[in-house]
Amino acid sequence: MKTVYLLGAGASIGNTHGKFPGIDTIFRTAKDLNILSETTKKVLPQFDDLSKYVKTIMKKNVLMKSEKINIETLMTYIDLELEASNDNSYYYDLKAKLNKIIRDVIIKSSEAYLSDNEYCEYKMLSDTLSKEDTIVTYNWDTMLDDILGRKYLINDIFNHDSYGKEKFRDNQYYNFLYDISAIALMTRGHISIDLPYRDYVNKKGYFLKQHGSIDWYYCSNKDCRAYGAIFPMDEHTTEGYFCSECHTKLEVLIVPPILNKRIRTFPTLNRIWNLSAQEISNCQRLVIWGYSFPPTDFYSKWLISKNSNSIKDLIIINPNLIRNTKKNIFRNSIFFNNIKSVLPIVNINTSYYEYFEDFINHNDINHKYGQVIF
């Protein structure tokens, strides 16, 4: 039975037991990690323009810990500025600075938490995957990527080290790297899908990152033959990477969850969304972990709703499913209604779990709390 795991920000937060920053605590974490400022009252000079823009457009101070600044909303505003402005250099600079903050926060937060000896929830997920299962994730971090062999497999490409390729051969990240990323261009094996396309059934499992990743680099030069191809890199450098074709400095590909996604700008990202639709439409079990169905992400809601007809079993994993007071535990009606607006819960065998570990242990919310909540 093919299973698709759909992961949102809550999955990475759950994997680190709440220590990983959410979309509205990136600036707060950047301050704590001395990425944004070295004092409590002044941002570093290179981020002064970005700080002023946030103050103007969102009426918030990036150095105040009490301020919740939604990073995806800010990215959306800057993208809208780029579309509306005749002089894009200023907003491209803001975008580059914001991307740097996001990447530095995610990298340092991941390095501070990850341990090879810790059996985290992402390792639990990795251990439960079948070869044909697919992961569709909206997260930018590389914690799950690394557990699936990211560094070993990329290192193998450049250094011809067979250890990584053999240990992680044909897993979800391996299939992404060799079938979807720019590495696939090194072969002639990806020219066409067997016909007829209507009968296409994928027997592989993939690792599909819908919103890009902090380790994905691309050439922005439209005249370059490498334009739009995605190059995952195993190391993060302050100097950056440069295209071997046109020598343009490569940019990091991270996309905010807005209606007008720039998917078609990047052929690989377009393919990832199309393949995600196919995977969801052909799966019998859908596991949604840590995804909150944000109101602005109409594209993702459409993707799930349109392609859910074959799903027999639906598993929702999210602590926001319930409201736990001192006296009682209630179903979170707002979150529950968001789910119902996308998926026909009444026609699918649905189960609910607070955490991924509960799912592994078959300890659903009703059983865990000894009362019927769903």
Image (cartoon, helix red, strand yellow):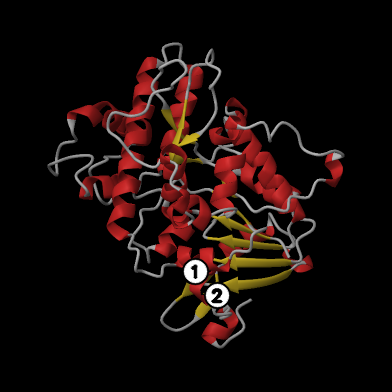
Q: Where does residue 333 sit, x and y in percent of width and height?
A: 59, 66
Left or right placement of residue 230 versus residue 281 in this view: left
Q: Is residue 101 above or below residue 349?
A: above
Is disc 1 in contact with disc 2, using a CB cutoff of under 8 Å? yes
Asked if residue 15 shows in the view, the reply is: yes
Instruction: Look at mark 1 in the image and give the residue it sits on.
Output: 124
Name which residue lies at 50% across and 65% down: 320
Which is nearer the eye, 365 or 164?
164
Q: Is residue 47 left or right of residue 118?
A: left
Identify the residue at horizontal 43%, vertical 53% (top origin): 146
Residue at image location 37% in from the left, 34% down from the top:
99
Q: Quadrant of the C terminus?
A: bottom right
Name the mark nearer the viewer: 1 or 2.
1
Residue identified by numbered label 2:
360
Give the percent coordinates (x, y) of residue 294. Answer: 55, 50
> Left or right of 4: which side holds 27?
left
